Image: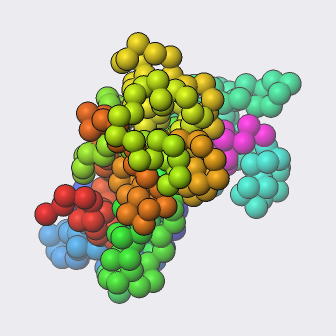
Amino acid sequence: MISRNLRHLRLFAGVAELKSLTLTSERWHISQPAVTQAINKLERETGGALFERSRHGFFLTPRGEVLLARVESAFALLDPVLNDISPRLRLSLSFAQLQALVAVSESENFTLAARRLGLAQPTVHRAVTQIEQEAARSLFERTSFGILPTRLCQALAQAARLAIYEFDQADAELAEFNGGEAGAIVIGAMPLARSVLLPRALARFRQQQPTYPVRIHDGPYDELLGALRRGAIDFLVGALREPAPIGDVVQQRLFDDRLALLAGPDHPLASRTDITVEDLLGYPWVVPRLGTPTREQFETIFTSAGKEPPRRLIESGSLLLMRELLNESEHLGCLSRHQSQRECDHELLISLTYPTDHLVRPIGLTYREYWRPTSAQSLMLRLVAEVAPGAG
């Protein structure tokens, strides 16, 4: 792993640009031996040469090019915000101070932030105070409820999170040069992805990458999207939103899914072919929560016929809960057709004969704009696309 010494990384980027230790030392007002020491330390950490030295200057090796791309991305995120706060922070800010600011911003409490970082509370308080002193302004508002980050502090914390993500990506890419592994793939999975796409993709991934760590996060879409934008998740798999929820994410459609209206095998509607909206209104339902594409389509069935949607509802996106409840009662269920297909194939559930082919929702990938996946992440993306229904 590369150290998170921001000054060393800036000096590395300077040598890459100027191709000279002397010019870099002059630009940053630091001695040439200090620049040499920084480069040598980084080369030890990355496991090989970052530059080819010649009498014409310093030129990046392939290993150096990988590191430079991530370092430039990280500082491109940080520097505009640092310039708004105080340009001097570009020289003085340390990684430990960044970590402290992010932790306090998220915890809104110095004690909780210190516990999260495994540090003493005075250490975290001092780190944040040093940033504020350098900036000559407060970055937190002290209230009786806690300490609240200012808008500028929130911008810096968000930039810091994504910059830290870029450094982590650098670790993963540099490890490949030494035949090793670093980092992990973190996937935000919505219900359809958990039951259909990801099990197949993960089985194929494990054949090619037997030991590479993979973590799956599930939860409400808004929580997953927030984690994605903070850099805590690499990409999301599941239902896309139309239009995209915010401008800094990209959506990639893989296939279209359709709605299924479900019942237990012994339900009174299970064998009928003349089901009406009034019939559907006569029973309680298990449906996904408000705000999901499936729930919106479910309600469309009734509103398009001039009816109020059912009110006797249990909100859940769990196929297991739905299957058991539908088999224990006269509840009906609404779920993705692909997600419920295996249950219907085994006659554990019955898909009602009611037209829903016009209710289509796109399924695919969501990731941050300008995100550059590592080779392992790219492999996972490719495998998810390959196992998608209808993939060539």
Which residue is nearer to you in this view: 214 or 173?
Answer: 214
Which residue is nearer to you in this view: 335 or 90?
Answer: 335
**Residue 212 shown left or right of residue 136 in the figure:** left
Residue at horizontal 77%, vertical 59%? 119
Image x and y of residue 270, in percent: 45, 47
Image label count: 0
Q: Is residue 106 magenta?
A: yes
Q: Is residue 153 magenta?
A: no
Image x and y of residue 327, in percent: 59, 54
Residue at horizontal 74%, vertical 37%? 108
Given the current orientation, which residue lies at the most extreme right position? 144
In the figure, 19 relative to 111: above or below?
A: below
Image x and y of residue 373, in percent: 32, 60
Residue at horizontal 49%, vertical 61%? 348
Magenta-drawn stretch, dominant element (helix, strand or loop): helix
In the figure, 261 relative to 377: above or below?
A: above
Q: Is residue 287 something one can see in this rendering?
A: yes
Residue at horizontal 17%, vertical 74%? 55
Q: Which residues are magenta?
A: 99-109
Which residue is nearer to you in this view: 196 or 14?
Answer: 196
**Residue 389 shown left or right of residue 342 in the figure:** left
**Residue 76 shown left or right of residue 186 in the figure:** left
Which image quadrant: the C terminus? bottom left
The picture quadrant where one finds residue 205 is bottom left
Which residue is nearer to you in this view: 317 or 123?
Answer: 317
Q: Is residue 187 something one can see in this rendering?
A: no
Image x and y of residue 263, in percent: 49, 47
The picture quadrant where one finds residue 139 is top right
